[in-house]
Image: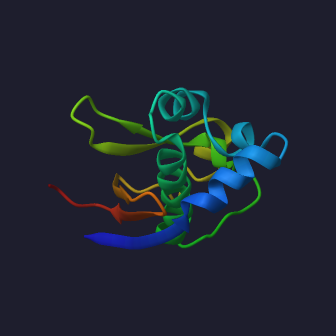
Amino acid sequence: MTAGIGTDIVEVDRIAASLGKEQGFREMVFSPLEIAYCEAKTHKYEHYAARFAAKEAFFKAIGTGWKNGTSFNEIEIYNEVSGKPHIRLLGATAATLSELTPEKIQVSLSHTVSMAIAVVMVGRFSL
């Protein structure tokens, strides 16, 4: 059973500009693992943008929006060796959302040079 679906689309240039201009934006929004992953990529801003979109889509899927007690850098998007992305909740965000966190979180990411999109499904379903 799907409990919620969220989607978000962002302009890669907007995220690139924030990463370049806003002091601390990178660390406030992305986990150390995400930063290392994106920085290792040739087109790093596309990967940052896709991860940002996934975090926004996650909040939409659980139906709360961003709320006190949650931090963007504690919603971590990581990849299997095959490239399949996953979402992991960390720290205070995991504790704050413990009652709302579904059994399954599925995420799909896609990006071009100018746009990044993420779709997140949450619920209790088997694949």
Q: How many marks?
A: 0
State the residue at coordinates (52%, 60%). Answer: 53
- The figure's colour scheme reads rainbow
Q: Nearer the viewer, residue 23 or 120?
A: 23
Give above or below for 70 relative to 116.
above
Where does the image place residue 9, in percent across and percent down from the top left? 49, 70
Where does the image place residue 30, in percent across and percent down from the top left? 62, 40
Relative placement, left or right, of 73 versus 37 is: right
Q: Quadrant of the C terminus?
A: bottom left
Where does the image place residue 62, in percent across and percent down from the top left? 50, 67
Q: Nearer the viewer, residue 92 or 55?
A: 55
Q: Nearer the viewer, residue 105 or 118?
A: 118
Relative placement, left or right, of 91 versus 111 is: right
Relative placement, left or right, of 98 versus 91 is: left
Q: Quadrant of the N terminus?
A: bottom left
Q: On the image, which quarter does residue 75 sit in?
A: top right
State the residue at coordinates (36%, 44%). Answer: 86
State the residue at coordinates (47%, 54%). Answer: 50
Q: Nearer the viewer, residue 18 or 103?
A: 18
Give above or below for 29 relative to 35.
below
Residue lying farthest to the left in this orientation:
127
Q: On the image, which quarter does residue 91 sit in?
A: top right
